[in-house]
Image (cartoon, rainbow, N blue to C red):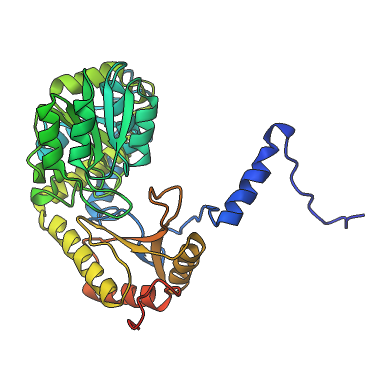
Amino acid sequence: MAPAHSTPAPAVAPAFGWLGEQRRARESAGLVRTLRPRPADSPLLDLASNDYLGLARHPETVAGAVEAARRWGGGATGSRLVTGTTELHAELERELADFCGFEAALVLSSGYAANLAAVTALAPQGSLIVSDAANHASLIDGCRLARATTRVVPHADPEAVRAALGAHDGPAVVVSDTVFSVDGDRAPLSELGDVAREFGAGLIVDDAHGLGVLGAGGRGAPDAAGLAGDPGTVATVTLSKSFGSQGGAVLGPAPVIEHLVNTARTFIFDTGLAPAAVGAALAALRLLRREPRRAARAREVAATLHQLLTDEGLSAVRPDAAVVSVRAPSPDEAVRWAAACRAAGLAVGCFRPPSVPDGVSRLRLTARADLTDEQLAEAVRVISRTAPRGAVSAGSR
C-alpha cells in the first residue's frame, strides 16, 4: 500500500490515452518543450527575444501602453466590427501605412492572425498559392485553410515560382517570408515581384522580421526591395518584434484592406487588439521615426555577432537582418547547449524540429540595437565555452 502522503499519478481519460505515447515519442526524439516563466527583471543577457530595437521596455513604449489603458480600458471589448475599433486603432493604421509606404493598413490581434487573414482572403477557390518551402508556420496554416491549391516550391527560388505560375491558368498569389525566421536569410523580393507581375499574380510577404530592421529607417523589406506601395503587393507585419508590443497588421492597396474587413475570418470573428498594445506600438513607431539609426544598429550588431561566432569556429549563418543562426549537432545537444548558456547568464533561442524546415537544430540568436560591443563579446565567450563537441571546427579552440 502506498504511503498516506504520496500523490497518485493523474488519471488519463481513455479518450486521451494516446497522449502518453505521443509524449514518449517526443522524449525519445529530444523534442519535449516546456514553458519557462521569466521574472520581470531577468538577470540574463537576452539574445533570445525578438525585441530587435530594444523598445519593449523603453519608457516611451511603456508610457504609450499605460496611457492607452487608462483612457480606453484593459481590453478592446469586442470584435473590430462591433466595439473593438477605437480611434487609437485607426491612428495606428494610418501611421503604420504611411511609414511603410502602403496605401492602407488593418490591425489584427497577432501577426499569426494577420497572415491567416491575408492568405485565406486573397486565395479563393480556383486560385493557386505558390509558397516558399521555408515559410513560417502561420503562412503554411494560411495555405492549408485557404480554398486555393497550394504549390510548395524550393526555398528562395524565383525560377521555381515562375515554373509554378506558368503551369497554372487563373488567379494566383506568391507567398513568402521577407526574412526567414530560422536562419535569418532574406527572400529575393525584387525577383519575386518581377515574376508575380509577369504572370499577373499577387505577392503576399510576411515582413515580421524585416520591419524595423530593413529599409530606409526600418521601413521594412518591401521598402528595401522597391515594393512598398506596389499595387500587386501585400505585406503583413507583427507589432511584437521591433515595436516591442503585441499584434499584427496587413498592409496593401485600399481595395485589398476593404476586402479583408469584409471577408477575413481572423479579423471579423476575433476580439480587437487591446488598447495598451496599440498605444505601445504607436509610441514605438513614432520613436523609430525620430531615431531611424536604431535599424542600422540592429544590423550592425547582427553582423558583429556573426563575425565573432565564426572567428570561434562555430557554424553561424551570415545574417541578412537581425537573426543569427548557429547550428547544433543534434536536438539533444541543442537543448543542453541552450541550458548551459542559460546557466552561464545568457538567454538564447533553441530551434528544433518541427520548427526548422530542414530538420537541423540550432541556437537562434537575435541582435538588438541596444546591445553593447562588450555584451556581444561576453555572449560569444559563453556560447563558445559551452559549445558541444561537433559544433566547433577542429583547431578553432
Compare residues 267 and 340 and report the one nearer the observer: 340
Q: What residue is rendered at 10% in x and 46% in y?
A: 224
Residue at 32%, 41% in the rendered image: 133
Q: Is residue 306 above or below residue 312?
A: above
Q: Position of residue 178 (x, y in %)?
A: 21, 44
Res 235 seen here:
no
Viewer-nearest residue: 273 or 186: 186
In the foreground, 91 or 73: 91
Is residue 191 positioned above or below 349 on the image?
Answer: above
Q: Which quadrant of the structure image shows residue 227?
A: top left
Front residue of 10 and 94: 10
Residue 47 lies in what quarter of the image? Answer: bottom left
Identify the image quadrant of the N terminus.
bottom right
**Which quadrant holds residue 374?**
bottom left
Tell me what residue is drawn at x 29 percent, y 54 percent. 51
Question: Can residue 395 be seen in the rendering of this structure?
Answer: yes
Q: In the picture, which quadrant includes the C terminus?
A: bottom left
- Residue 44, above or below 283: below
Residue 276 in the image: state x and y as whole percent: 31, 39
Q: Is residue 277 left or right of residue 233?
A: right
Position of residue 220 relative to residue 113, above or below, is below
Q: How many marks?
A: 0
Across and down, in percent, residue 126 comes to 29, 16
Q: Position of residue 386 (x, y in %)?
A: 43, 75
Q: Tell me what residue is drawn at x 21 percent, y 35 percent.
A: 161
